[in-house]
Image (spheres, coloured by chain):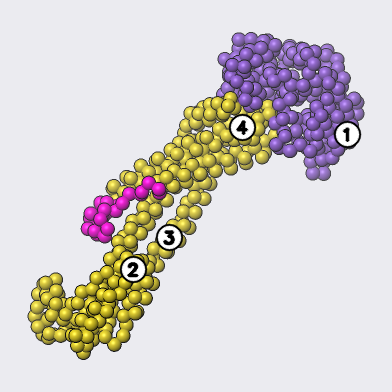
Chain colours: A purple, B yellow
Amino acid sequence: MIRMYHVQKKYGEIAALRDINLRVEKGEFCYVTGPSGAGKSTMLKLLYGAELPTDGKLLVGGVDVSKLSDRKLPGLRRNMGIVFQDFKLIQSRTVGENVGLALEVIGTPRADIERRVQAVLGIVGLRGRGAEYPRMLSGGEQQRVAVARAIVNDPSILLADEPTGNLDGAMAIEVMEILQAINLRGTTVLVATHDAGLMERFPYRRLRFEHGKLVQS
Amino acid sequence: MHSLQHILRRALRSLWEHLYLNAMAALVIGAALLLMGVYLTVQYNLNAIVDTWDRDVHISAYFHDDVPEERRFAVRDQVAARAEVLQVRYVSSADAREWLRDEVEDIGPVLEELGDDALPASLEISLAPEASSTPEAISAFAKSLEGPDFEDLDYGQEWIERFNAFLSLLQLLGAVLGALIGVAALFLVANTVHLIVYNRRDELEVQKLVGATGTYITAPFLVEGAAQGLVGAILSLVGLWGVHRLLVVRLQEALQLGLAGELAFLPWPYRIALFAAGLLLGVTAAFVSVRRFLATAP
């Protein structure tokens, strides 16, 4: 699912990632971990095309992301779901509208959007909450809405950047259980986190970064 | 088809949610178009006045005193036979005195003192429209009359040329002014739209992250821009009509200019041009603003 060959990312003279070689297979669950500033978020940004590598080759689902043009970026992102620490929900839109956005941008008919949104809200435990606004929900619930939006179009890969960073213990576990369930349905899941407790409770492969280098995979 | 529905729905929603900013953008476009419209109205009416004068070009050719009357009639007939000439009238010295006596009150004693031949005999020549379409053509015809028979030729050449030069200058100024107003309006509207984009930056960023194309993100803003442009054009025409009724017509009445009948309101082709300019302004400003945002969004 993911192939990285000698990938490097520099910001001016500062190297955020150095000579990364990596394979992640379809259906795997991996943590991207390491201390702050180790390169976890940069790694995810390269995967969803927000940044291009300075050097090396990066394939995601067979797509060469290292040379991705702006025109081809939407195609890549339609096949992946992304979850952020700060949820990135649109406050002026209802929960249902937020979740349905990924389907709306590809021109899905409204009736199909409605049906699919109800189904994924059920998966994340928010059935019947589609008409509420994000500000009416708890942090954990908002993150579950973000997860629902990320999986509504059945992506083959799900990237989560510190998805439990703003949540307390119980809520973090709830979100992890949902991610685990999504992975069991065949989606490749990469979670960037430095929460050691969470990684022990849900033990999966760890990709550990230090000073931009992959030191454990 | 479904994408089009989503785009229109989002555009209408944004128009409503950002009513104040959209109204501001429409007002800026309206103000710019109003200025352009005032300029176009002035120029249109001046051109109409010049057209009227051009259609009625008149040359007075004054005979030397020593040219015998038979020769004067012969010259009149020669001139009348020319294709450029619509009509020729011989005005004798006595006719000129009579005319002046009728036109100017209390001039009789002055004319008596000056004697019978104080005013020269002349040919009053009206030119056909095709011979008087340009100042150059009129001047060429007048020059062809020069010779031993005539003492002086009067056809307001200098005046017509000056007025045409003034019109050319006005056109140049209008083009420069129009370009400046257009750029200023584009800048103002683009910044107003930028505020709308800024208010919606989270939404646009999320749209991009879930795989929306640049076209999909930009399209609703173009619809909004078009709506701003159309409303702006309507506002400018209403404003222009007000300016026309309140200022132009009243000014004309007050000064009793009577130059070319009632000064005309902007005709339909110009109005359509104002609508097109409004659309272009609104859509371009929206395009520039959204593309500027998308270039920096993750």
Please say if the residues under marks 4 and 1 sit with CB atoms less than 8 Å apart: no
Q: Residues within 10 Å of mark 4 (few under 14, many from 20)?
A: some
Q: Position of residue A204 (x, y in %)?
A: 86, 17
Separation of marks 2 and 4 at Cα, in angstroms: 58 Å
Q: Which mark is residue B132?
A: 2
Q: Is residue A74 magenta?
A: no
Crowding at dot 3, Cα within 10 Å, few <14 / some 14-19 / many 20+, comes out as some
**Residue B171's disc number:** 3
From the top left corner, tell me how far across and down residue B120 is, in percent: 19, 82
- Between the residue at mark 3 and the residue at mark 2, the CA separation in whole angstroms equals 22 Å
What secondary structure is found at the residue carrying circle 3? Answer: helix
Label disc, if present, on residue B77 of the rendered structure: none
Amino acid marked by disc 4? Tyr
Indicate which label's residue lies in the foreground, 2 or 4. Answer: 2
The vertical placement of A216 against B157, above or below, is: above
Q: Which residue was labeled with disc 1?
A: A5
The residue tagged 4 is: B216
Left-right relation of B213 to B70: right
Q: Residue B89, located in which quarter of the rendered image?
A: bottom left
Which region shows up in magenta? B248-270
Q: Chain of mark 4?
A: B
Q: Amino acid at mark 2?
A: Ser
Say which quarter of the image contains residue A40. top right
Callout 2 secondary element = loop
> Mark 1 vs mark 2: same chain?
no
Point out the frontmost of discs 3 and 2. 2
Residue A107 picture location, percent across and down: 62, 25
Relative to A37, B231 lies left or right:
left
